[in-house]
Image (spheres, rainbow, N blue to C red):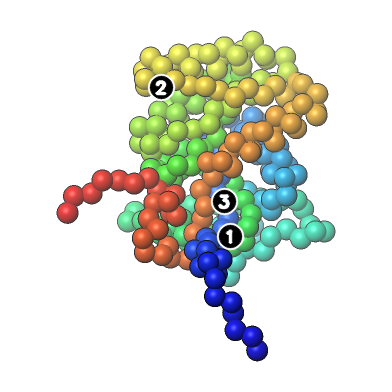
Amino acid sequence: MHDAPLNQAMGLLGLAAPLSPQLLAVVSHGDARTEQPLLWQLSSALSELGYHVTVLDATVSETLDNTGLLQLLDYPFGHAMPGEDGPAWNVLPAALGLQSLCALGARPAHSLQRLGQAFQGNGVVVLYAGVDPLVRLLGNTDLRPLLSVSGEKSSLLTSYLALKRLLRKGRLEPTILNMMPGGQTGSAAGVAHALRECAKNFLGYELNAIRIDPAQAEAQVDAAMRRLVTRLLEHALPLQTEQAQPGLGAQRTGYREASRSH
């Protein structure tokens, strides 16, 4: 049996981080008519880029007949990725599991590690949840949740309140998506403009929204979605599947460096 060669490359291989699932987040703020089709489009775009995708829908609770995140956390044997003959992505209920991860006294870094252990593999996990659990679980990380705005009458108020909590409570800078349904272009543009002015005047935040018009040709919408998911992946949060090694710090965990006094 030959001995392993000793060279600089072997040392570099030892420092290489293992592949880990990437976490994206989509904010649920009461605009399901826009958000749920958006989840479908995002999952499709990620699949076309070659990623295995699991959507954790925290607006739906797990049951004995419809198991989901809670059961995976209780029995962390790894989540099977979709096979070649199966669906391109999975959607799992996640309300109770997310509640468990955000329970009083739970440490966010440990909760994210538990989530990573349940979804081992080089895939993408999309967490669709309300702003409060997202802030508790993901606050002070570099992840940029996707916050969509539409022409719905309530969208301005709910998206502004979500933006305010993300920025002030979670120190999370979201990616804002201006969805413009066919026939409501003026209304949607007005909501996006009003949100930008509210963010500037009341939060001191300069908002630059990405615009996608679903009334465009399918090829144009698909291309815009691919650009959007590429941007989201640039700010995705790697989910650790094991304890981080000493000395790797915030770069490995996804948390920003915080000054501490001793």
Q: What amino acid does circle 1 point to?
A: Leu
* Residue found 74% across the figure and 31% down from its top: 223
| Residue 87 image point, x, y percent | 77, 53
Answer with the quarter of the image where residue 177 lies. top right
The residue singled out by tag 2 in the image is 205
Between the residue at mark 2 and the residue at mark 1, the CA separation in whole angstroms equals: 35 Å
* In this view, 60 is above or below 150: below
| Residue 71 image point, x, y percent | 56, 63
Between the residue at mark 2 and the residue at mark 3, the CA separation in whole angstroms equals: 27 Å
Sequence-wise, the earlier of marks 2 and 3 is 3
Q: Residues within 10 Å of mark 2 (few under 14, many from 20)?
A: some
Image mark for residue 161:
none
* Residue found 30% across the figure and 46% down from its top: 258
Residue 82 visible in rendering: yes
* In this view, 76 is above or below 182: below
Sequence-wise, the earlier of marks 2 and 1 is 1
Q: What amino acid does circle 3 point to?
A: Gln
The residue singled out by tag 3 in the image is 22
Q: What amino acid does circle 2 point to?
A: Tyr
> Closest to the observer: 51 or 2?
2
| Residue 136 image point, x, y percent | 39, 45
> Closest to the observer: 136 or 222?
222
Image mark for residue 19:
1
Marks 2/3 in contact by CB < 8 Å: the verdict is no
Looking at the image, is mark 3 or mark 1 nearer the viewer? 1
* Residue found 67% across the figure and 39% down from its top: 42
